[in-house]
Image: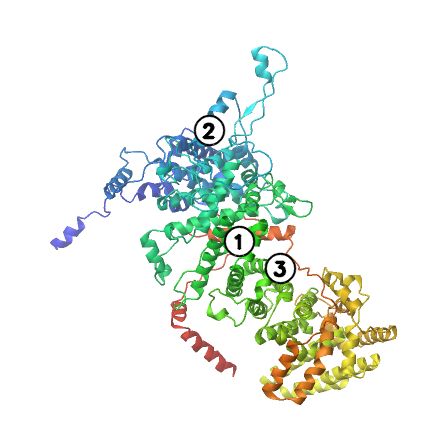
Amino acid sequence: MDSFKMFTKLPQKIPDPFNLLGDQPKLAFRSQPGGIAKLATTRNISEKDSYWEQYVVLFDSASDVFTLITHNDVRRALYEAPENVATLIRVITSRLFNLVSDHTFPTPPPSSVSSLASSIIRTGTGASGERNTTKEVLNCIRVLQRVLPAVFEIESEPSRFEQEVLWKRVEVRPQDAAGQAQGGAAGSSVEQASAEPQFVIEDEDESDEDEDGGGARAPKSPPRQQTSPKAQEAQKPKETMPSIAERLFSCLIDLMFCCGFTLPTKIQVDHYKINYVIWEKGVGSTTDPGPSQQFESNKTEVLRLLLVLLSRQIYVPPATLFTSPSSYTLHFVQNLPRRDVLTVLCSLMNTAVNATHPGSANVMGTVAGRLPYNHLLMKGEDPRTSLVSMCFQVLCVLLDFQSGTARDVIVEGQTSGPTAKTNAFRYFIAKLHRPADFEFLLNGIVTIFEDEMSSLNGLLPGSKKPVPYMVEAIIFLWKMLELNKKFRAFLLESDKAMDITAYLLCYGLEIKDKPEQHGMCRVLSYMIQGLSAERAFGVKLSAPLKAHLPQKWATVGNAGDFIVQTIYSMVATTSGSLNSLYPALVIALSNSAPYFKNLSVTSSARLLQLFNAFANPSFLLSDEGHPRLLFFVLEAFNGVLLHSLQDNPNLVYAILHAHKQFEDLGTFTLARGLREIRRIQQLKEERAAQAQGRGSVDKGKRRARDEEEGAPGDEKARLLQREAESLDLSHSADNLHNVAGRHTDVDAQTRPLMSPTATEASISTDVGPAISEKARGKMRAAGRSLSGDMTGSLERLAASGVGRNGFVPTQEWVSSWQQGLPLDVIMLVISELLPKVQNLQSSLSGASASNAIIDLLRNANLDQVLPKPPPLSPRRFMWSDASIVWLTSLIWGEIYVRGMTPLGIWNNTAVRLFYVKHAQAQQRQITETVTNVVGGLLGRTESSQSLGRRQ
């Protein structure tokens, strides 16, 4: 009983006299009337009110700010007391500008554990200790990160609130303007603090104007005559101070290069703490400023606010992306001094490409990073990974921006490109030219790709975390290849060209089954198409691959074999879910085909399987754009047969083996295609009925239909017989010769499907035996008779739409593309080689016949039969307004998703550039992890059970 009384005397709440955890003021800020609620409930809070002080000194981390201040809080204040939000922005930015120029900033970090503990105690007790200006600067940055997205989402474009608060310039007296222009940063003294020039990027255009980076002051006009001082004062142009947004950009750039905050203090010159030194060794800098692990989180905070300012773009609909550009991004890419642009650009690039540099992490981080399954134990990203991700994201946004006046212009009379006045970051990326810089960038990107491949190829499945910034690294590489022709040539001539291609294709195979990653699959397909259009790329296709790839994607043969088989896998295993990617991938095959050499049996079979899939009537007639895929595959066959027939006996033999499909395609009609579709449908129905035990009933129905219209197989045989009779062709070889000499008069409607070169024209004029006008008349008559051979059921099948989109094919549409198919070269090769192969097959047997056929095809010389190969004219990826908008939305969509955790920077805001679909979060089951680790035992059990059910 006494012991119970002793426990009752204990306090109900354990006191915290030192407030070591610092939670009480934060909880009060969230719950008390004097906290965040006052922002919306009390009107016209004065700028000098002590209420604003808590926004600067209360928070200890970014998570504190994003937890205690929500977008709904800011949104409510914007509707009920907008003047308070304007005051908050003015107070926070003014405090930030003053802190950066204050001599007490940055606060030196604690040098020992005891000093760290004492600082925590002083902070918790509220004792008057040393002021932590670094913490105040970080809190100013974090509050702006939280408030600005809610301001940007206001419906009006651009909002009056935004213009009044962030972009309005205030007229001041000249002496005040001069004094304030130097107050926000280090002023002109920064120039003296910079050491010898670091940059090797040359700008042969206009001289650098506005080098001081101040405001946009109007030039003073000299007085025309002697007047009184008052008159002179009246005649002078009015001076304006830079707007808050302009000063904020300048302040952020200063913070990016502030010694003791983002750079080591050892490089500080005298008392000038702002020193424009590139963050890490690499492009533009041959010296390393020193280790800065302790400043990586500060760099990330500054870049996050910069990214928030640039994110004004995501609150504009796609239709107005070009006409309503973001004022923030426009200012950043067009109005920064050249020194700032180069220093920021090189710092971001070097930090991003040095992502896996051995010296970029401490010893414990390096050891922990090598442990298997470490990412399952350690939640969140380490500071270095967060910084690299942020650098890549800012780079991608700046290099992608082409809205408004930042759009590329026509240069050199042909191609469009950036200038220093449209987008300085795109312009200077295009001006990189040193091989050492290219080597540095290429090695860094290859290292990132290799890390991603190793996460897919480990002995323990799922033991290594995938590279979190893989998407941004790929887009950055695409921008480098697009903007810098010298870098593209350097990459293609290096020994890493095929390695990078293999990594890109393997990554595409890995993500192709994830719907949220289909946008990245599209990026990869366009990149492969662009690379395949270069001759240097094709020359390397015959070399073996040296890259270490995941075993499941490894292939036997050379680089050409790998590309053929991976593209086949992308097309064949996606079940039509990536239809928009197929043209770019098949065009890549067509571009590469002239350089294919010694394709393996597997690769040759894969190409024929692609042809059969695209020539299948159910696919061919289901969409208006599908025939072009068939055209590109045939063009790939032509490229091989015209340029390297003797070097690819396996592919030639596969084409000869499938000669019947090519012959049928030469006389393809809508009626025949619909009959084939109906035959397949009937077979499926019959199998389904047999499985359900109703085979006899359906067989009777099918017999009635066959008696009415003829069996599908017999109908096809009769159709072929009528075609042969109408053309008066009795032998298959004659048929091949005559079909090969057709279509000299191609309708203009077929031109979009034709190659931009004169390939088909040269084929039709140079092919040996030409068809007489009488034979042509018979062929056209046959076409007419076949097009009129449509029965009522076939017409109903066509009218109902054979495709998923309800597309209704017509015979006129079929004729428009069927007459333009490049079949001539293929039919000539078949007509010349097929009889010889058949003779060998009849005279020999087994392995001896196969060897003899391969030897025959290796030594086959058809130069006198085939037309002269036309000049190569590969199809390159061409940018359009739609593709630019698509890539911009893709980049910002990835940034949005990455920002959802842990802070949720743009969560629950009215994004208009893309659609945000929130999926219900599903907790990862322990069985999934067990399945990955033990090799799929549980999965095999489930699959065997399902197989048993199907049987």
Of badges 3 and 2, nearer the viewer stands: 3
Please state the horizontal and vertical placement of residue 610, each as a whole percent of the image.
63, 71
* Residue tagged 3: 535
Total number of numbered labels? 3
* Residue found 32% across the figure and 53% down from its top: 363
Q: Is mark 3 on a helix, strand or loop?
A: helix
Using the image, determine if residue 77 lies above or below residue 173: below
* Residue found 65% across the figure and 54% down from its top: 878
891 to the left or right of 7: right
Find the distance from the CA under tag 3 to the CA under tag 1.
19 Å
437 to the left or right of 780: left
Please state the horizontal and vertical placement of residue 559, each as a whole percent of the image.
55, 66
* Residue tagged 1: 477
Dot 3 or dot 1: first in sequence order is 1
Q: In which quarter of the image is the N terminus?
A: bottom left
Dot 2 or dot 1: first in sequence order is 2
Q: Quadrant of residue 136?
A: top left
Q: Do the residues labelled 2 and 1 touch (CB within 8 Å)?
A: no
Find the distance from the CA under tag 3 to the CA under tag 2.
50 Å
* Residue found 56% across the figure and 27% down from its top: 217
Q: Which residue lies furthest to the left in this view?
A: 2
Please state the horizontal and vertical placement of residue 78, each as a whole percent of the image.
50, 39
Q: Can residue 73 be seen in this view?
A: no
Given the image, on which type of amino acid does mark 3 rest?
Arg
